Image (spheres, coloured by chain):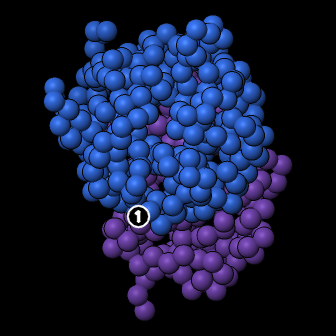
Amino acid sequence: MKRNIAVIDYGLGNIRSVINMLENIGANAIVALREEDIINADKYILPGVGAFNAGVRNIEAYGFREVLEEQVLKKGKMILGICLGMQLMGISSEEGSLKGFSWLAKRVVRFREKESVMNGLKIPHMGWNVVNEIKTHRIFSNIKHPMRFYFVHSYHMECEGADCEYGLTNYGYNFVSVVIQDNIIGVQFHPEKSHIFGMQMIKNFWELK
Amino acid sequence: MLRGRLIPALLIHKRGFVKTKKFRNPVYVGDPINTIKIFNQKEVDEIVIYDIDATVENREPNYKFIMDIVGEAFIPVCYGGGVKRIQEMERLFRLGVEKVSISHQAVYNPHFVKDACRIFGSQAIVVTLDYKSKIFKKEGKIVYTHNGRKCSGITVLEMVKKLTDYGVGEIILNSISKDGTKEGYDFEFIKKISDKIKIPLVALGGARDLLDMKNVIKYYGASAAAAGSLFVFYGKRNAVLINYPAEEEINALFQADKQ
């Protein structure tokens, strides 16, 4: 059967842009609305536009928490979390009180206002910024340097030198913009909105085995 | 480090893209899908699209139309026009819109902004304030709605304070009297407001050239510079031509010290 990739629709993601880009690179993309869509898919994209608590609540209301855990943790299927989708993979967030998937031993924190403001920076971090690849991975293959991506967020995963940190971005200080732990990949920026850079990254993810 | 964003602001009127002057006399500049495709190829930072008919006609956004546009945009899109309800915003985000701009509803029902921020996160919520000074009055710059036709009686300053308290992610200040004039941004006013807020402020209305855009960002506190005419008209005769500087040109401009 033809390989496919499911974009998980939990009511808060920008599903359409992700699908548009997947179709543009020739991937066999579906929108996962039900549990069986998830079970039948080969890999996943977990998009995200929204607040942390709303994200957790919707994932649970749609009944996706257990099935994703099963497919990602037990079956080892690949998943790419985008923005809030990445943050949901962590333990918790300062933006909300609910528990994330906890696949990554990472907490999500708000931008440290003092340091940002001192440097004349505003929150949310909104716009194009550079991702520095601190460890090589095929997800970065063939992307033109400097790798520029579009960011829109007020919260981020902290840079602590953990094994899962693959890409860092500087906004007043370094934060983690790419996390990778085996089959689990998270990116803080929006590849689906980062034209040539994002298109190459999505293509890399689709081609990852 | 992040450089300021340069944002084409496009107006939808009767299913086409138009450009106005002081919010009047819309001139047709092109087919939306085609225009977006060109901007996409030019790797623009971001795009903001306003449906200038929606609030005036008291209708919801034209979802089908927006879907077609966004389907061609692998760049961040902010949509504004006629948004009054949370469900409408949810629908827009699902279509692939990155940010939603609220104007009328933010002015007359600011609590809506608070709700929207709680649900979708501040970063996805933008408020665009169309403003101008009232003749013979010294009450400051006043916010207008309904395409500049309805005076709210509320000053920009008051509105901005309220909106930042309610958690809005970004504010676009759109000068009605500068719109389409290419006579320079409302620099001093942008500076005045940006000094008072911590969230990103976007300048719109009056951009003369790229240097203007750089200056409003580097010296007047804007996080981004938006423009209509500059990116759709070209040359002295204002011929319609979709244009946008290359990344190298933008970087060179921002690195140079010339004001």
Q: Residues within 10 Å of mark 1 (few under 14, many from 20)?
A: few
The quadrant in which residue A112 appears is: top right
User: Residue drawn 71% across and 21% down?
Assistant: B158
Q: Where is residue A154 in the image (x, y as percent from the top left)?
A: 63, 38
State which chain is coloured blue. B
Name, please, the residue furthest toward the front.
Answer: B136
- B115 relative to B61, above or below: above
Foreground residue, B38 or B137? B137
Left/right of residue B56 with respect to residue A21 in the rendered view: right
User: Residue drawn 80% across and 56% down?
Assistant: A99
- According to the image, label 1 marks what residue? B68
Foreground residue, B89 or A134? B89
Foreground residue, B76 or A111? B76
- A188 relative to B234, above or below: below
- A13 relative to A112, above or below: below
Question: Is residue B124 at all visible to an observer of this figure?
Answer: yes
Q: Where is residue B200 in the image (x, y as percent from the top left)?
A: 56, 28
Q: Where is residue A11 in the image (x, y as percent from the top left)?
A: 66, 65
> Chain A appears what colour?
purple
The quadrant in which residue B89 appears is: bottom right
The N terminus of chain A: image quadrant: bottom left
User: Residue drawn 45% across and 13% down?
Assistant: B187
Question: Is residue A85 at all visible to an observer of this figure?
Answer: no
Name, please, the residue furthest toward the right.
Answer: A97
Amino acid type of disc 1? Asp
User: Residue drawn 37% across and 31% down?
Assistant: B21
What chain letter is assigned to the residue under label 1?
B
Identify the secondary structure beneath mark 1.
helix
